[in-house]
Amino acid sequence: MPEADHTQKEKQFYTDIQPKNEGFFLKGSNSYDWGMKNRLSNIFDPKSGKTVMLAFDHGYFQGPTTGLERIDVTILPLIEYADTLMLTRGILRTTIPATYNKGIVLRASGGPSILKELSNEQLAIDIDEAIRLNASAMAVQVFVGGEFESKSIHNMTRLIDMGNKASIPTLGVTAVGKELVRDAKYMRLATRMLAELGCTYVKTYFVEKDFDTVVAACPVPIVIAGGKKLPELDALDMAYRAIQAGALGVDMGRNIFQSEDPVAMIQAVRKVVHENENPRAAHDYYLTLKNENNR
Ligand code: R5P
Protein backbone atom coordinates (compact mmCIF):
# COMPACT_ATOMS: atom_id res chain seq x y z
CA MET A 1 0.00 0.00 0.00
CA PRO A 2 1.34 3.50 -0.72
CA GLU A 3 1.72 5.83 2.25
CA ALA A 4 -1.03 8.40 2.83
CA ASP A 5 -0.49 11.68 0.95
CA HIS A 6 0.63 14.09 3.73
CA THR A 7 2.03 16.80 1.49
CA GLN A 8 0.73 20.29 2.11
CA LYS A 9 1.05 21.17 -1.55
CA GLU A 10 -2.24 21.95 -3.25
CA LYS A 11 -3.30 19.41 -5.91
CA GLN A 12 -3.03 20.70 -9.45
CA PHE A 13 -5.19 19.17 -12.19
CA TYR A 14 -4.28 21.61 -14.98
CA THR A 15 -7.92 21.93 -15.97
CA ASP A 16 -7.03 24.65 -18.50
CA ILE A 17 -4.72 22.30 -20.49
CA GLN A 18 -6.37 19.95 -22.97
CA PRO A 19 -4.70 16.51 -23.31
CA LYS A 20 -2.88 16.10 -26.60
CA ASN A 21 -4.48 13.73 -29.07
CA GLU A 22 -1.84 13.39 -31.75
CA GLY A 23 -1.90 10.91 -34.61
CA PHE A 24 0.94 8.41 -34.99
CA PHE A 25 3.72 9.63 -37.30
CA LEU A 26 3.84 6.61 -39.60
CA LYS A 27 1.76 6.12 -42.73
CA GLY A 28 -1.18 3.73 -42.30
CA SER A 29 -0.25 2.85 -38.73
CA ASN A 30 -2.56 4.98 -36.63
CA SER A 31 -5.05 2.26 -35.78
CA TYR A 32 -2.63 -0.12 -34.11
CA ASP A 33 -2.35 -0.44 -30.37
CA TRP A 34 0.45 0.94 -28.22
CA GLY A 35 2.76 -2.08 -28.38
CA MET A 36 2.74 -2.20 -32.18
CA LYS A 37 3.35 1.55 -32.44
CA ASN A 38 6.13 1.37 -29.89
CA ARG A 39 7.84 -1.37 -31.89
CA LEU A 40 7.42 0.59 -35.13
CA SER A 41 9.08 3.56 -33.38
CA ASN A 42 12.05 1.25 -32.78
CA ILE A 43 12.35 0.73 -36.52
CA PHE A 44 11.36 4.11 -37.97
CA ASP A 45 12.97 7.16 -36.38
CA PRO A 46 10.05 9.27 -35.10
CA LYS A 47 12.02 12.48 -35.90
CA SER A 48 12.52 11.84 -39.62
CA GLY A 49 9.81 9.18 -39.97
CA LYS A 50 12.32 7.01 -41.85
CA THR A 51 14.61 4.05 -41.32
CA VAL A 52 17.98 2.66 -42.32
CA MET A 53 17.64 -1.07 -41.85
CA LEU A 54 20.93 -2.94 -42.08
CA ALA A 55 20.20 -6.30 -43.74
CA PHE A 56 22.53 -9.22 -43.15
CA ASP A 57 20.16 -12.18 -43.10
CA HIS A 58 21.47 -13.51 -46.44
CA GLY A 59 23.05 -16.56 -44.80
CA TYR A 60 19.62 -18.09 -44.20
CA PHE A 61 19.64 -19.36 -47.77
CA GLN A 62 23.11 -18.65 -49.20
CA GLY A 63 25.50 -19.29 -46.33
CA PRO A 64 28.53 -17.05 -45.67
CA THR A 65 28.20 -14.71 -48.64
CA THR A 66 30.91 -12.14 -49.40
CA GLY A 67 31.12 -9.62 -46.58
CA LEU A 68 29.27 -11.87 -44.13
CA GLU A 69 31.94 -14.52 -43.59
CA ARG A 70 32.51 -13.17 -40.06
CA ILE A 71 29.61 -11.07 -38.90
CA ASP A 72 31.31 -10.41 -35.58
CA VAL A 73 34.22 -8.79 -37.42
CA THR A 74 32.52 -7.00 -40.33
CA ILE A 75 28.99 -6.15 -39.17
CA LEU A 76 29.33 -5.32 -35.48
CA PRO A 77 31.20 -2.06 -36.26
CA LEU A 78 28.19 -0.97 -38.35
CA ILE A 79 25.31 -1.61 -35.99
CA GLU A 80 25.56 1.69 -34.13
CA TYR A 81 24.74 3.50 -37.40
CA ALA A 82 21.63 1.45 -38.23
CA ASP A 83 18.12 2.22 -37.03
CA THR A 84 17.34 -1.47 -37.03
CA LEU A 85 18.96 -4.78 -37.90
CA MET A 86 17.46 -7.36 -40.25
CA LEU A 87 18.84 -10.76 -39.33
CA THR A 88 18.18 -14.36 -38.37
CA ARG A 89 17.67 -15.58 -34.83
CA GLY A 90 20.87 -17.63 -35.11
CA ILE A 91 23.01 -14.57 -35.73
CA LEU A 92 21.10 -12.53 -33.16
CA ARG A 93 21.75 -15.05 -30.39
CA THR A 94 25.34 -15.88 -31.29
CA THR A 95 26.74 -12.58 -32.40
CA ILE A 96 24.74 -9.48 -31.46
CA PRO A 97 25.38 -8.17 -27.94
CA ALA A 98 22.24 -8.28 -25.78
CA THR A 99 22.96 -4.67 -24.86
CA TYR A 100 21.91 -3.66 -28.38
CA ASN A 101 18.73 -1.68 -27.82
CA LYS A 102 17.53 -0.50 -31.22
CA GLY A 103 15.21 -2.35 -33.60
CA ILE A 104 15.46 -6.04 -34.45
CA VAL A 105 13.66 -7.38 -37.52
CA LEU A 106 13.78 -11.16 -37.48
CA ARG A 107 13.84 -13.28 -40.59
CA ALA A 108 10.72 -15.40 -40.13
CA SER A 109 10.55 -17.53 -43.28
CA GLY A 110 12.99 -19.91 -44.90
CA GLY A 111 13.67 -23.48 -45.89
CA PRO A 112 15.31 -23.97 -49.28
CA SER A 113 18.93 -23.07 -49.97
CA ILE A 114 20.32 -21.58 -53.17
CA LEU A 115 20.72 -25.20 -54.30
CA LYS A 116 16.93 -25.61 -54.49
CA GLU A 117 13.76 -23.76 -55.54
CA LEU A 118 14.07 -20.67 -53.33
CA SER A 119 10.42 -19.69 -53.33
CA ASN A 120 9.30 -22.88 -51.59
CA GLU A 121 9.60 -21.32 -48.13
CA GLN A 122 7.75 -21.99 -44.90
CA LEU A 123 7.47 -20.05 -41.69
CA ALA A 124 10.70 -20.57 -39.79
CA ILE A 125 9.97 -19.16 -36.36
CA ASP A 126 7.30 -19.34 -33.72
CA ILE A 127 5.71 -16.26 -32.19
CA ASP A 128 6.91 -17.24 -28.68
CA GLU A 129 10.49 -17.18 -29.97
CA ALA A 130 9.99 -13.74 -31.55
CA ILE A 131 8.61 -12.43 -28.24
CA ARG A 132 11.52 -14.02 -26.31
CA LEU A 133 13.98 -12.28 -28.64
CA ASN A 134 12.19 -8.95 -28.21
CA ALA A 135 11.64 -8.61 -31.96
CA SER A 136 10.49 -5.24 -33.27
CA ALA A 137 9.13 -6.95 -36.40
CA MET A 138 9.18 -10.25 -38.30
CA ALA A 139 9.99 -10.47 -42.02
CA VAL A 140 8.42 -12.92 -44.45
CA GLN A 141 9.29 -13.46 -48.11
CA VAL A 142 6.33 -13.36 -50.53
CA PHE A 143 6.59 -14.57 -54.12
CA VAL A 144 3.75 -12.89 -56.02
CA GLY A 145 3.52 -14.54 -59.45
CA GLY A 146 5.92 -17.30 -58.43
CA GLU A 147 5.38 -21.05 -58.40
CA PHE A 148 4.64 -21.06 -54.67
CA GLU A 149 2.69 -17.79 -54.62
CA SER A 150 -0.29 -19.03 -52.57
CA LYS A 151 1.91 -20.87 -50.09
CA SER A 152 4.04 -17.80 -49.46
CA ILE A 153 0.94 -15.61 -49.10
CA HIS A 154 -0.43 -18.11 -46.60
CA ASN A 155 2.89 -18.00 -44.69
CA MET A 156 2.50 -14.23 -44.57
CA THR A 157 -1.12 -14.13 -43.38
CA ARG A 158 -0.39 -16.68 -40.64
CA LEU A 159 2.57 -14.61 -39.50
CA ILE A 160 0.45 -11.43 -39.54
CA ASP A 161 -2.21 -13.11 -37.38
CA MET A 162 0.42 -14.33 -34.90
CA GLY A 163 2.18 -10.97 -34.92
CA ASN A 164 -0.98 -8.94 -34.43
CA LYS A 165 -1.88 -11.00 -31.35
CA ALA A 166 1.49 -10.11 -29.84
CA SER A 167 1.63 -6.57 -31.30
CA ILE A 168 4.68 -7.47 -33.39
CA PRO A 169 4.67 -5.85 -36.86
CA THR A 170 5.06 -7.95 -40.00
CA LEU A 171 7.37 -6.86 -42.81
CA GLY A 172 6.25 -8.39 -46.11
CA VAL A 173 9.17 -8.77 -48.50
CA THR A 174 8.30 -8.84 -52.20
CA ALA A 175 10.67 -11.38 -53.71
CA VAL A 176 10.93 -11.34 -57.48
CA GLY A 177 11.99 -14.49 -59.30
CA LYS A 178 14.21 -14.30 -62.37
CA GLU A 179 11.26 -14.94 -64.66
CA LEU A 180 9.27 -11.89 -63.49
CA VAL A 181 9.62 -8.36 -64.87
CA ARG A 182 10.59 -5.85 -62.20
CA ASP A 183 8.50 -2.85 -63.21
CA ALA A 184 6.10 -0.47 -61.50
CA LYS A 185 3.07 -2.45 -62.62
CA TYR A 186 4.35 -5.60 -60.94
CA MET A 187 5.50 -3.74 -57.82
CA ARG A 188 2.12 -2.00 -57.49
CA LEU A 189 0.42 -5.39 -57.62
CA ALA A 190 2.77 -7.08 -55.15
CA THR A 191 3.03 -4.27 -52.59
CA ARG A 192 -0.71 -3.56 -52.65
CA MET A 193 -1.54 -7.25 -52.15
CA LEU A 194 0.78 -7.45 -49.15
CA ALA A 195 -0.70 -4.32 -47.61
CA GLU A 196 -4.29 -5.39 -48.20
CA LEU A 197 -3.63 -8.79 -46.67
CA GLY A 198 -2.38 -7.10 -43.51
CA CYS A 199 1.38 -6.43 -43.60
CA THR A 200 2.42 -3.61 -41.32
CA TYR A 201 5.02 -2.48 -43.81
CA VAL A 202 6.44 -3.70 -47.10
CA LYS A 203 9.88 -4.08 -48.61
CA THR A 204 10.24 -3.95 -52.35
CA TYR A 205 12.77 -3.22 -55.05
CA PHE A 206 13.17 0.27 -56.46
CA VAL A 207 12.11 0.61 -60.09
CA GLU A 208 13.39 3.39 -62.32
CA LYS A 209 10.06 4.43 -63.78
CA ASP A 210 6.96 5.46 -61.80
CA PHE A 211 8.16 4.30 -58.40
CA ASP A 212 6.07 7.11 -56.90
CA THR A 213 2.94 5.29 -58.12
CA VAL A 214 4.05 2.14 -56.28
CA VAL A 215 4.34 4.17 -53.08
CA ALA A 216 1.06 6.02 -53.69
CA ALA A 217 -0.93 2.82 -54.24
CA CYS A 218 0.40 1.16 -51.09
CA PRO A 219 -1.37 2.26 -47.88
CA VAL A 220 1.47 1.15 -45.58
CA PRO A 221 5.13 2.26 -45.43
CA ILE A 222 7.49 1.01 -48.15
CA VAL A 223 11.21 0.45 -47.69
CA ILE A 224 13.45 -0.52 -50.57
CA ALA A 225 15.86 -3.43 -50.73
CA GLY A 226 19.40 -2.54 -51.70
CA GLY A 227 19.92 -5.37 -54.18
CA LYS A 228 23.21 -6.38 -55.74
CA LYS A 229 26.35 -4.32 -55.16
CA LEU A 230 26.55 -1.09 -57.15
CA PRO A 231 29.20 1.64 -57.19
CA GLU A 232 28.66 3.74 -54.03
CA LEU A 233 27.37 6.80 -55.90
CA ASP A 234 24.81 4.71 -57.78
CA ALA A 235 23.56 3.08 -54.58
CA LEU A 236 23.20 6.49 -52.92
CA ASP A 237 21.41 7.77 -56.03
CA MET A 238 18.96 4.86 -55.91
CA ALA A 239 18.26 5.46 -52.22
CA TYR A 240 17.76 9.19 -52.89
CA ARG A 241 15.31 8.65 -55.71
CA ALA A 242 13.36 6.11 -53.68
CA ILE A 243 13.10 8.47 -50.71
CA GLN A 244 12.09 11.40 -52.93
CA ALA A 245 9.38 9.17 -54.42
CA GLY A 246 7.98 8.52 -50.95
CA ALA A 247 9.79 5.42 -49.66
CA LEU A 248 10.22 5.60 -45.89
CA GLY A 249 13.60 3.95 -45.79
CA VAL A 250 16.01 1.36 -47.06
CA ASP A 251 16.69 -2.21 -46.04
CA MET A 252 20.20 -2.35 -47.38
CA GLY A 253 22.75 -5.12 -47.17
CA ARG A 254 25.32 -5.72 -49.90
CA ASN A 255 25.59 -2.08 -50.91
CA ILE A 256 26.76 -1.40 -47.37
CA PHE A 257 28.69 -4.43 -46.21
CA GLN A 258 30.34 -5.06 -49.62
CA SER A 259 31.33 -1.39 -49.94
CA GLU A 260 35.02 -0.50 -49.92
CA ASP A 261 34.30 1.28 -46.64
CA PRO A 262 31.11 -0.03 -45.00
CA VAL A 263 31.31 2.31 -41.98
CA ALA A 264 31.52 5.34 -44.27
CA MET A 265 28.85 4.01 -46.59
CA ILE A 266 26.21 3.41 -43.94
CA GLN A 267 26.73 6.96 -42.66
CA ALA A 268 26.31 8.33 -46.18
CA VAL A 269 23.11 6.31 -46.60
CA ARG A 270 21.83 7.84 -43.35
CA LYS A 271 22.41 11.33 -44.79
CA VAL A 272 20.25 10.49 -47.80
CA VAL A 273 17.48 8.78 -45.83
CA HIS A 274 17.20 11.00 -42.77
CA GLU A 275 18.42 14.36 -44.09
CA ASN A 276 17.34 14.22 -47.75
CA GLU A 277 20.97 14.80 -48.74
CA ASN A 278 21.48 14.66 -52.50
CA PRO A 279 23.53 11.72 -53.80
CA ARG A 280 26.56 13.81 -54.88
CA ALA A 281 26.88 15.47 -51.48
CA ALA A 282 26.31 12.14 -49.71
CA HIS A 283 29.01 10.57 -51.89
CA ASP A 284 31.44 13.38 -51.03
CA TYR A 285 30.64 12.71 -47.38
CA TYR A 286 31.36 9.01 -47.97
CA LEU A 287 34.75 9.83 -49.55
CA THR A 288 35.66 12.19 -46.71
CA LEU A 289 34.86 9.57 -44.09
CA LYS A 290 36.68 6.91 -46.10
CA ASN A 291 39.81 9.06 -46.30
CA GLU A 292 39.66 9.75 -42.57
CA ASN A 293 39.21 6.04 -41.79
CA ASN A 294 42.23 5.15 -43.96
CA ARG A 295 44.58 7.62 -42.30
C1 R5P B 1 17.20 -11.23 -49.08
O1 R5P B 1 16.40 -12.08 -49.22
C2 R5P B 1 17.46 -10.70 -47.78
O2 R5P B 1 16.25 -10.70 -47.09
C3 R5P B 1 18.09 -9.33 -47.69
O3 R5P B 1 17.80 -8.84 -46.41
C4 R5P B 1 17.61 -8.30 -48.66
O4 R5P B 1 17.71 -8.78 -49.95
C5 R5P B 1 18.36 -6.97 -48.52
O5 R5P B 1 19.69 -7.13 -48.74
P1 R5P B 1 20.41 -6.55 -50.04
O6 R5P B 1 20.43 -5.05 -49.85
O7 R5P B 1 21.76 -7.15 -50.03
O8 R5P B 1 19.59 -6.92 -51.23
Image (cartoon, helix red, strand yellow):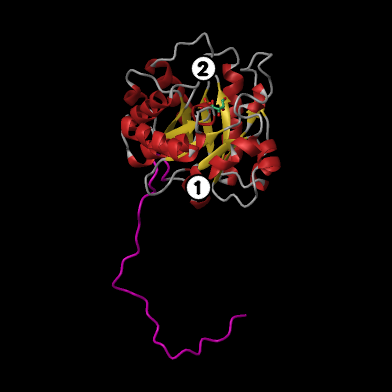
* The magenta stretch spans residue 203: no
Q: Residue lying furthest top in this view?
A: 179
Residue at 59% x, 81% y: name it.
Answer: 2
Label 1 or label 2, whichever comes before in sequence order: 1
Image location (x, y in percent) of residue 154: 60, 25
Q: Tell me which segment is drawn in magenta.
A: 1-30
Does residue 214 appear in the picture of this structure? Answer: yes
Image location (x, y in percent) of residue 177: 54, 14
Name the amino acid type tagged 2. Answer: Val
Q: Residue lying furthest front in this view?
A: 295
* The magenta stretch spans residue 27: yes
Image location (x, y in percent) of residue 65: 63, 24
Does residue 220 appear in the picture of this structure? Answer: no
Could you say whether the residue bearing mark 2 is in a helix, strand or loop? loop
The total of numbered circles placed on residues is: 2
Some atom of ligand 1 lies within 8 Å of the CB belonging to the residue at label 2: no
Residue underneath mark 1: 42
Which of the two residues, 13 or 109, is positioned nearer the viewer here?
109
